[in-house]
Image (spheres, grey):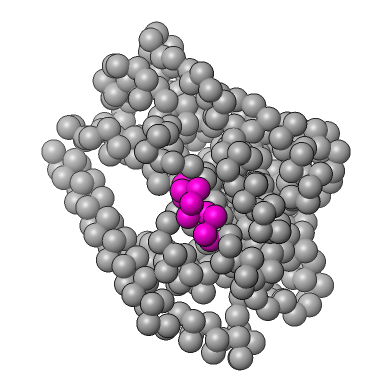
Amino acid sequence: MYQKKLFLVNKNITKIIDKTLYSFSSLLYRVGIPKVYYDIKTQLGMVGIPILVYHRVCDLQSDVLTPGKMSVSVSAFSEQMKYLSTHYHSLSIDHLAEHLIMGKALPSKCVVITFDDGYLDNYINAYPILKRNNMQATFFISCGAVDSNIGLWPDQLVNMIQVASNGMKVIRAILNENGINLPVSLSKPDFIAHVLTILKSISTIRRYELLNQISKELDNYVHRETKLMMSWSQIREMALNGMEIGAHTINHPILSKTELNEVKKEIEESKRIIETQTGQLVNIFAYPNGRTEDFNDTIKDMVRDAGYKAACTTIFGLVKSGDDVYALRRIGIQTDDMSIFKARLCGFGGHRRLFAKLRKL
């Protein structure tokens, strides 16, 4: 009971903080504070370049397989790209890395646009909008899921919960058998969020053992009939038309929770597979999940040794001269609100990272 209350209290507090601070960010932008802040830093030579990270561009309400709000609507994405094409110049990560490696001054009013995982709506919805606005983007591909209708392991878990009538009951029982106790009476969204958090925190081997056990138990589990991920032909088309393609491992494991020999395979083989499929050199990498705890110096060295020029995280922040090219910060875009979008472009909105640090004090 205590565990359940603690989870729900923390979740409710997070929701309140998010709503309050996002509203505050929107208000600040409307009165011009982020822009003034940005202009002052520009004059002082302290401004950084935003690397934006998207996952999906689709209608969330019509797609129950999206775990959490990892999406923006098509109309919002179109408005965001129109704004960027008017006020910014898009760079590839390869170009950005060259400036950082050579110690060159970073160009002003530039933005890098990235997409993680390789969802089909990136090609169907985002790619035409990018072309229409003459914007370049980088697509990080988890190549083991290419052309798949079940997606990555978080998508598969969500699918099992959504499709199987006894999904939540079976998952709860299996986790309990393995010493993982879940709070009772969780709503389906809270249940999904809680299970995903748990599975990301355990070793890759144990996670796949649990997922396989869950899948076997759910004999009425039905895979999604329509494609969820891009095909190689679609990825090749984007690469041939100026989009940058990067590697995001094969199976999207949390690398810090994975045996080093498997980490090496995920890093090296994903590069080789994408290069073979596209006929183009793959110089850039993105860490799955990408938080501070999801990779380390040993993994960064393995990325460098595999021949990558740079690697991206999901740690919030702008990229500045002198930054580590194997730990580039990015800014997650999961909002349809243009004021919040513009504020985040200026580097506002990293409150979760701040509160995570405060909780450790």
Q: Quadrant of residue 260?
A: top right
Query: Who's the residue at 19% across and 51% down the image?
Result: 9
Q: Is residue 40 left or right of residue 340?
A: right
Query: Who's the residue at 59% across and 35% down the image?
Result: 120
Q: Quadrant of residue 22?
A: bottom left
The foreground one among 302 and 211 is 211
Q: Above or below — where is 346 with respect to 294?
A: below
- Where residue 264 sits in the image (x, y, percent)? 70, 39
Q: Is residue 356 left or right of residue 236?
A: left
Q: How many marks?
A: 0
Q: Above or below — where is 235 with respect to 317?
A: above
Tell me, yes or no, if residue 173 can be seen here. no
- Where residue 176 sits in the image (x, y, percent)? 28, 24
- The quarter in which the C terminus is drawn is bottom left
Q: Is residue 184 left or right of residue 65?
A: left
- Where residue 201 sits in the image (x, y, percent)? 43, 41
Tell me, yes or no, if residue 215 can be seen here. yes
The foreground one among 237 and 256 is 237
Q: Above or below — where is 207 with respect to 314?
A: above
Query: Who's the residue at 16% across and 45% down the image?
Result: 5
- Residue 78 painted magenta: yes
Which residue lies most toward the front here? 132
Q: Above or below — where is 314 with respect to 30?
A: above
Query: Who's the residue at 66% across and 58% down the image?
Result: 133
Which residue lies most toward the top here? 219
Magenta region: which residues? 71-80
- Residue 182 painted magenta: no
- Where residue 329 sits in the image (x, y, percent)? 58, 63
The foreground one among 4 and 314 is 314
Q: Is residue 48 left or right of residue 244?
A: left
